[in-house]
Image (cartoon, grey):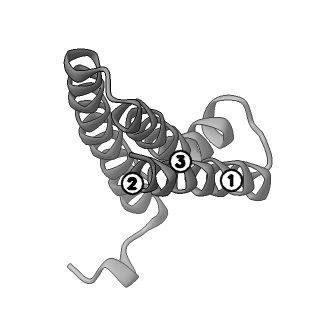
Amino acid sequence: MNPLLAGPMEMTLALAVVKTLVLVVGGVITYFSFKAYRRTRQRALGYLTIGFGLVTLGFVLAGMLYELLEVHLVTGILLESLLVLAGFLVIAYSLYVQ
């Protein structure tokens, strides 16, 4: 099946599946980085955990806001992008600090 010819229902379902997988995988990565932080108490791992949490939340938030709270889609995408940006900045900082 050509994804460009798929109807809105198929695309909505595919997006929901992908966003759910992003939430699960991002949650697992965040959990493991938190476990590593708790075990070692290294500040960099704490920042890494926060960064992964923000990125995961950002990737999932736009669709949830649009579907559940009826927030304008552009507003949701802007909030998503800001969270992902903040998460990446925190991850970059965690790699910089010793």
What is the secondary structure assignment of the residue under circle 2?
Answer: helix
From the viewer's perspective, is residue 34 above or below residue 88?
Answer: above
Mark 3 or mark 1, whichever is nearer to me: 3
Q: Amino acid at mark 2?
A: Leu
For this view, does 48 lie left or right of residue 77? Answer: left
Q: CA distance from mark 2 to mark 3?
A: 9 Å
Instruction: Name which of mark 2 and mark 3 comes first in the sequence.
Output: 3
The residue shown at (57%, 40%) is 61
The residue shown at (48%, 63%) is 8
Mark 1 or mark 2, whichever is nearer to me: 2
What is the secondary structure assignment of the residue under circle 1?
Answer: helix
Q: Give residue 59's position: percent from left, percent from top.
A: 49, 49
Q: Give residue 93's position: percent from left, percent from top.
A: 51, 52
- Name which quarter of the figure residue 73 lies in: bottom right
Q: Amino acid at mark 1?
A: Leu
Instruction: Name which of mark 3 and mark 1 comes first in the sequence.
Output: 1
Q: Nearer the viewer, residue 10 or 89?
A: 89
Q: Nearer the viewer, residue 67 or 32?
A: 32
From the viewer's perspective, is residue 41 above or below residue 60?
Answer: above
Q: Residue 82 got which mark?
A: 1
The residue shown at (33%, 39%) is 20
Q: CA distance from mark 1 to mark 2?
A: 20 Å
Q: Amino acid at mark 3?
A: Val
From the viewer's perspective, is residue 15 above or below residue 37?
Answer: below
For this view, does 2 lie left or right of residue 70? Answer: left
The residue singled out by tag 2 in the image is 95
Q: CA distance from mark 3 to mark 1?
A: 12 Å
Q: Residues within 10 Å of mark 2 (few under 14, many from 20)?
A: few
The residue singled out by tag 3 in the image is 90
Q: Residue 5 got which mark?
A: none
Q: Give residue 65's position: percent from left, percent from top.
A: 66, 37
Given contact means CB atoms under 8 Å apart, are the residues at marks 1 and 2 in contact?
no
